[in-house]
Amino acid sequence: MRSYRSCSHGLQWLVIAVVAIHSMGAAEDEAGKRRQFLKDYMVKDKEARRAAVQSLTGCSQRQTLGLLARVVASDKEPEVRQEAFRVLAACPEETSGASALLVQCFRLEKDKGIKQEVLQLVGDRKLKFAWINELVRFLSSECSYPHIPDDVSERGPNGNTFKKYEKQRAMRGDFHNVVLTINAMTGQKFTSTNKTAAEIRAWWAANGAKYQKADRELEKQWKEAAKAKK
């Protein structure tokens, strides 16, 4: 008669085997999605390309992330690149390493409209250091808070109408969205003024190391958890 220990040991190996088979199946399934993507993406129709990118939602293997990064870097249509950003942002940070790639893609993207859309996707990131570091740079080098006279209104006394300062108002709006994203990531309460960029740079210089340390500890926890599952 088998002992309880031997039965338990055998059950453990059975569970491990089932998990391994499931993992292999998932990997094969994602490889199949990549092959289908390559067939569907190589067309002129932008909506078809966007749908092909969308089909990779939920994938997390490095090869898949590489394909998405290539779309972001090379597709001429903003809608397609924007979809690739959405799929990348949806990848689980703890298993795919997508976070660093997403930051890099954001930095290289030239379309300001797409960058503003990406800001709406990243406020709740678990790994914060690289993102905050990039947003501090972005706020200081690619955004601005232009002067608008205090008497600007719909009718505009002295000719200071909303329409006249439409471009400046849009620039302030983009600036404010970056500040809101930094606040969402950090819990700070920065307001948007012509002094905000300098205030955030000073705050980041004093606090950046803490976020870097926290990210390293979190990544270590993820690695240990993944190792424990094997």
Image (tube, rainbow, N blue to C red):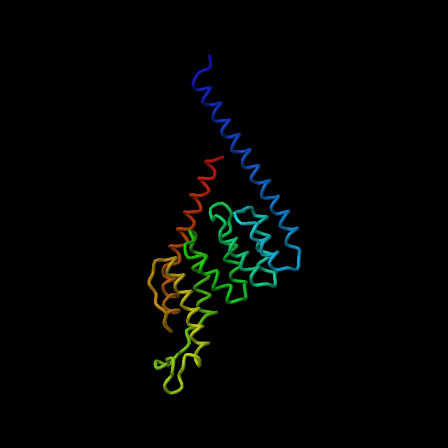
Numbered-mark total? 0
**Horizontal and vertical percent for residue 72?**
57, 59
Pick whichever, 21 or 127, lies toward us.
21
Establish if 51 lies above or below 4. Answer: below
Q: Farthest residue toward the top?
A: 1
**Horizontal and vertical percent for residue 186?**
37, 58
Residue pictured at 41% horizontal, 54% vertical? 124
In the displayed structure image, the side of residue 167 where residue 51 appears, left or right: right
Pick whichever, 167 or 73, lies toward us.
167
Establish if 8 lies above or below 175. Answer: above
Establish if 131 lies above or below 92. Answer: below
Which of the 4 image quadrants contains residue 148? bottom left
Residue pictured at 59% horizontal, 63% vertical? 77
Establish if 227 lies above or below 193. Answer: above
**Horizontal and vertical percent for residue 5?**
43, 20
Q: Farthest residue toward the left?
A: 189
Residue pictured at 44% horizontal, 43% vertical? 222
**Horizontal and vertical percent for residue 206?**
36, 61
Pick whichever, 119 or 202, lies toward us.
119
Residue pictured at 46% horizontal, 20% vertical? 7
